[in-house]
Image (cartoon, grey):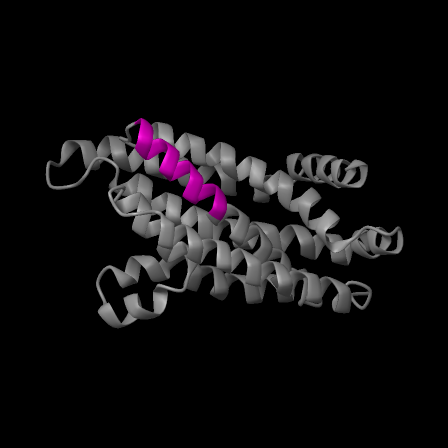
Amino acid sequence: MRIIKAVFTKQAKDMIKNPAILIQFIIFPVVAFLMTIFVARSNDDIPNNMFVTMMASIFAGMGLITSMTGIIAEDIERKSLRFLILAGVKPHQYLLGVGGFIMFAGSVTSVIFALVGDFTGTEIAKFLAVMILGVAASVILGATIAMLSKNTQAAGGLAMPVAVIIGFTPMIANFNETVEKFAVILYTQQINTIVNDFTVSPFKPLLIIALNIAVLSVLFIIAYKKKGLKND
């Protein structure tokens, strides 16, 4: 626990110094709020929470993947990761420390989304549950991409297309049945399913998201052990 806390604190300080990462947690709910006030609520044909659910899904997928990738890639370039590994920091400790802070920040952003959205008490609970799980999945995926990249530029180049696919596929699936059949395996599609229809049973979506998290966690541990000391 002491090691996890130390890595968590380190990441908190690093994020405060990095506005490029910090802005990712602000811009999405701000856009959702503005679009809700000036577009959705002035048009009877648009649901009040449409832009909230749309931007929340994109944030949980695209925004957090690129943010997490950038953070880990910087640790690799600055040799921070190599130092931590040599100091005996285990994969789960590093991920819980760095990812734990990003999850905390992502959870705060999710609460802001919930406040902007036109949700009831039960809907807020479902929304926050699925969002926090989605944040966890994106944190692990972003970390894995960074671990498999040689430097920050390579990490960014790989993370962006992956993030776009993960973040925007659910939106495309709304208009294309073929894409929808593929998208069902993605955790972002399951987020989209629940936040757009709170009457849907959450069991299957949450199970798929949990399976995504499990698979991504295994991939991260493998990447950490095999690549951690080779990223010089």
Q: Is 232 contained in the magenta span? A: no
Residue shown at the point (27%, 46%) measured from the top left: 196
Q: Residue furthest left?
A: 44
Residue 60 % position (x, y): 45, 48
Q: Is residue 58 left or right of residue 148?
A: left
Viewer-side residue, 27 vs 7? 7
Q: Which of the 4 image quadrants contains residue 32?
A: top left
Tell me residue 139's x, y (percent). 57, 51
Judge whether 85 appears above or below 149 on screen: above
Q: Nearer the viewer, residue 159 or 190?
A: 190
Residue drawn at the location 63% of the way across and 46% of the way down = 99
Tally of numbered discs: 0
Q: Is any part of residue 41 visible from this angle?
A: yes
| Residue 151 seen from this side | no
Q: Residue furthest right?
A: 87
Residue at image x 71%, y 35%? 13
- Camera-nearest residue between 24 and 19: 24
On the image, the x and y values in percent for residue 76 come to 75, 57
Predominant secondary structure, magenta span: helix
Left or right relative to 14: residue 37: left
Quadrant that contains the C terminus: bottom right
**The N terminus: image quadrant:** top right
Relative horizontal placement of residue 194, taking residue 42 as reference (left or right)? right
Picture quarter containing residue 56?
top left
Residue 126 lies in the magenta stretch: yes
Residue at 29%, 66% in the rendered image: 180
**Residue occupying the far bottom of the picture:** 178
Q: Give percent across and percent down for residue 227.
A: 75, 67
User: Relative to 78, is 122 above or below?
Assistant: above
Q: Which residues are magenta?
A: 121-133
